[in-house]
């Protein structure tokens, strides 16, 4: 089973700063099968990035995803007040079908 | 606008059963695979189960296999999760989530979009 490890656990930054979130897989993951979600308090997760680097519909271009193999990154170029939230990475494995999530990175206001 | 509204959660003693429902609107429900994902409050996410557009294929996490059954009624635009032999470790917020593409097969869904707001299941005596 592929395990996703996110770092750091918490990121303390100010609005306007750049956020770099890491997701490391225990085995190689196809980029096609790597997604990122944002979750705000009291809300359901919403997809930001799929296929490692494609922005979902309506997601601002300050969010970008990159990476391949075992190392993936979510970057928020300039933090807006509404970006302070928890971010999860997720991978899909096809044989047998299985979806696993990282433990999350909290981006908090410094 | 796509909407997914879960219901049926509550407090239940260990060993009992509960049935969750998810009412879908704003898209052609019968064309999409659907999933259940759960989250222990303040903790991580765990995929629970998925079902294809025509109920022809279903999948379960090892942690719930043999105890939970996913089903759907395309005429009612509804998704269900029958949970039997509940355990304390099943306590979580249960989300229904839609597959991203109209291919309709849950085993091809790479991610989930969107998710409902969730229904809380608490298993405790």
Image (spheres, coloured by chain):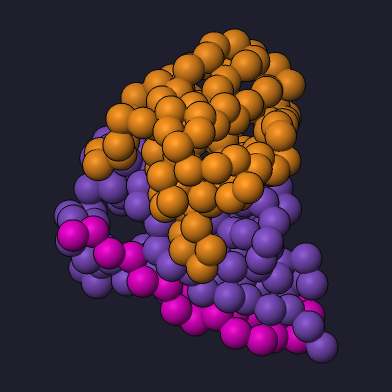
Chain colours: A orange, B purple
Quadrant including the C terminus of chain B: bottom right
Q: Measured from the top left, where is residue B51 in percent x and y?
A: 43, 50
Q: Is residue B15 left or right of residue B100?
A: right
Asked which quadrant contains residue B16, the reply is bottom right
Q: Is residue B89 above or below residue A37?
A: below
Q: Is residue A35 visible?
A: no
Rendered residue at 56%/35% (across/down): A89
Asked which quadrant contains residue A32, the reply is top left
What segment is highlighted magenta in the picture?
B1-20
Rendered residue at 62%/59% (across/down): B39
Asked which quadrant contains residue A16, the reply is top left
Rendered residue at 68%/23% (across/down): A25
Q: Is residue B7 visible?
A: yes
Q: Measured from the top left, where is residue B84 in percent x and y?
A: 66, 73
Q: Is residue A98 above or below residue B81?
A: above
Task: Indicate yes or no whether the magenta region holds residue B3.
Answer: yes
Q: Is residue A27 above or below residue A103?
A: above
Rendered residue at 42%/72% (across/down): B6
Task: Indicate yes or no whether the magenta region holds residue B25.
Answer: no
């Amino acid at each position: 089973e592929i395990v996703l490890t996110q770092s750091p656990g918490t990121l303390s930054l100010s609005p306007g700063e750049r956020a770099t979130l890491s997701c490391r897989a225990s085995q190689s993951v196809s980029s096609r099968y790597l997604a990122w979600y944002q979750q705000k308090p009291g809300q359901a997760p919403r997809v930001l990035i799929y296929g490692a680097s494609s922005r979902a519909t309506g997601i601002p271009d300050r969010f970008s995803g990159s990476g391949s193999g075992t190392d993936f990154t979510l970057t928020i170029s300039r933090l807006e007040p509404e970006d302070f939230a928890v971010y999860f990475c997720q991978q899909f494995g096809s044989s047998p079908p299985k979806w696993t999530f990282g433990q999350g990175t909290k981006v908090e206001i410094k | 606008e796509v909407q997914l509204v879960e219901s049926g959660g509550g407090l239940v003693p260990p060993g009992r059963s509960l049935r969750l429902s998810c009412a879908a609107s704003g898209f052609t429900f019968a064309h999409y695979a659907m999933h259940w994902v759960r989250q222990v409050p303040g903790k991580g996410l765990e995929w629970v189960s998925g079902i294809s557009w025509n109920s022809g294929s279903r999948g379960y996490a090892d942690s719930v296999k043999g105890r939970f059954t996913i089903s759907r009624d395309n005429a009612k635009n509804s998704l269900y999760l029958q949970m039997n032999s509940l355990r304390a470790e099943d306590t979580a917020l249960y989300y229904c989530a839609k597959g991203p593409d109209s291919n309709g097969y849950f085993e091809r869904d790479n991610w989930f979009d969107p998710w409902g707001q969730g229904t809380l299941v608490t298993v405790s005596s």
